[in-house]
């Protein structure tokens, strides 16, 4: 949803608290002008069902709010992996530890050996969900 993406780009954390959408400014510096934010909040309110569905889907996929903030801040999809640097992720080759994210590529240590890394397209790397083997 455009309003969620734009609010994140402006430095807001957009997340669910129960069934309510919560927006908090966590950016650096001053909060953006109300003239920019109010229309986005109105759009969010008007499309609440769509926004709630998107936020639930993101949560179900294992992505924390920090991932979307990084994506908005750095302007590319792979940045959503930055919060997982040094942490376990899932790849098509199984779980591993994320060592590096460069543009659309990642280096991941798999098989328990920190010296053995593989290169994986960023879009094929995702967080481990609760209960997944890793």
Image: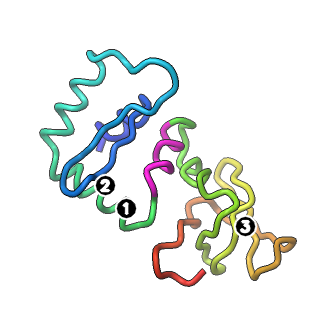
From the image, give the main secondary structure of the stretch colored magenta. helix
Q: Residues within 10 Å of mark 3 (few under 14, many from 20)?
A: many
Which residue is located at x 74 percent, y 60 percent? 99
Q: Which of the pair 78/86 is nearer the observer?
A: 86
Taking the image as shown, residue 10 lies to the left or right of residue 118, namely left
For the residues marked 1 and 2, what is the alpha-carbon distance in whole angstroms? 6 Å
Q: Is residue 48 magenta?
A: no
Q: Which of the pair 76/98 is nearer the observer?
A: 98
Q: Name the residue under label 1.
A: 59
Do the CB atoms of the residues marked 1 and 2 lie less than 8 Å apart? yes
Asked which colour scheme the image uses, the reply is rainbow
Q: Please provide percent x and percent y for residue 15.
A: 32, 49
Q: Which of the pair 18/77 is nearer the observer?
A: 18
Name the quadrant containing residue 38.
top left
Taking the image as shown, residue 31 lies to the left or right of residue 134, namely left
Which residue is located at x 46 percent, y 75 percent? 130
Which residue is located at x 87 percent, y 71 percent? 115
Q: Mark 3 points at which residue?
A: 108
Which residue is located at x 37 percent, y 39 percent? 5
Taking the image as shown, residue 71 lies to the left or right of residue 104, namely left
Q: What element carries label 2?
A: helix
For the residues marked 3 and 2, what is the alpha-carbon distance in whole angstroms? 27 Å
Q: How many labels does the image show?
A: 3
Q: Please provide percent x and percent y for residue 89.
A: 60, 69
Q: What stretch is highlighted in magenta?
A: 64-72
Q: Please provide percent x and percent y for residue 59.
A: 37, 62
For the residues marked 1 and 3, what is the alpha-carbon distance in whole angstroms? 23 Å
Q: In which quarter of the image is the C terminus?
A: bottom right
Q: Please provide percent x and percent y for residue 106.
A: 69, 59
Q: Which mark is residue 55?
A: 2
């Amino acid at each position: 949803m455009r309003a969620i993406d734009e609010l994140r780009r402006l430095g807001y954390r957009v997340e669910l608290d129960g069934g309510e959408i919560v927006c908090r400014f966590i950016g650096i510096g001053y909060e953006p002008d109300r003239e920019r934010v109010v229309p986005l909040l109105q759009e969010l309110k008007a499309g609440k069902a769509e926004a709630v569905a998107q936020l639930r889907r993101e949560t179900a996929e294992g992505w924390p709010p920090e991932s979307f903030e990084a994506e908005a801040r750095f302007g590319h999809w792979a940045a959503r992996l930055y919060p997982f640097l040094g942490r376990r992720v899932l790849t098509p080759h199984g779980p591993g530890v994320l060592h590096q994210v460069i543009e659309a590529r990642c280096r991941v240590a798999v098989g328990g050996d920190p010296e053995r890394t593989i290169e994986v397209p960023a879009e094929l790397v995702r967080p481990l969900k609760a209960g997944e083997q890793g």
